[in-house]
Image (spheres, rainbow, N blue to C red):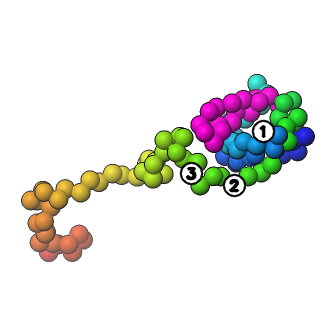
Amino acid sequence: MAKQIPVIGEWYQDAAEDVLFEVVAVDEDAGTIEVQYEAGEVGEFDFDNWMQLVVLPAEAPEDWRVPYELSDDDGQDPDDVYMPGAFDDPLASIETDSFYGLDDF
């Protein structure tokens, strides 16, 4: 019997089926728990079925991002400003004659 309360983002192992999965959503109104298995399939349990499972807390597998098709770039903050390097821009190498806040009047 599952004594684990499902936590979004945590990995668990179904001891009976010997599979790893991550809880991706808990819908209290519908009474469901959505999971995504290590291989990428999505599944769903209702609260009653979850309580019948034998689940153990588990570590995320080393290659867990492969089925989700994620790369290192996906971990970047989407709110960061992207400034591409303009290596061929001739104006990028020109230095200003003044410093910010130190202009002579």
Q: Badge 3: few (under 14), some or many (20 or more) residues near its Cα, within 10 Å?
A: few
- Asked whether the beta carbons under mark 1 and mark 2 sit within 8 Å of each other, the answer is no
For image coordinates 48% across by 41% down, the residue present is: 69
The three-letter amino acid code for the residue at tag 1 is Glu
Question: Spatial distance from mark 2 to mark 3, Cα to Cα?
Answer: 11 Å
Question: Spatial distance from mark 1 to mark 2, Cα to Cα?
Answer: 17 Å
| Screen quadrant of the N terminus | top right
Q: Say if the magenta span includes residue 101.
A: no
Disc nearer the start of the sequence (1/2)? 1
Q: Residue beneath label 3, please?
A: 63
Q: Residue beneath label 2, please?
A: 59
Disc nearer the start of the sequence (3/1)? 1
Q: Is residue 12 visible from the viewing direction of this image?
A: yes
For image coordinates 88% across by 45% down, the residue present is: 3
Residue at the left extreme of this rendering:
90
Rendering coords of residue 53 (x, y %): 85, 37
The one nearer the camera, 94 or 16, is: 16
Numbered label attached to residue 44: none
Numbered label attached to residue 17: 1
Rendering coords of residue 75 (x, y %): 48, 51
| Screen quadrant of the C terminus | bottom left
The one nearer the camera, 102 or 65, is: 65
Q: Say if the magenta span includes residue 45.
A: yes
Q: Nearer the viewer, mark 2 or mark 3?
A: 3
The three-letter amino acid code for the residue at tag 3 is Asp
- Asked whether the beta carbons under mark 2 and mark 3 sit within 8 Å of each other, the answer is no
For image coordinates 54% across by 40% down, the residue present is: 67
Total numbered labels placed on residues in the image = 3
Q: Main secondary structure of the magenta part?
A: strand
Q: Nearer the viewer, mark 3 or mark 1?
A: 1
**Residue extent of the magenta highlight:** 32-47
Q: Badge 1: few (under 14), some or many (20 or more) residues near its Cα, within 10 Å?
A: few
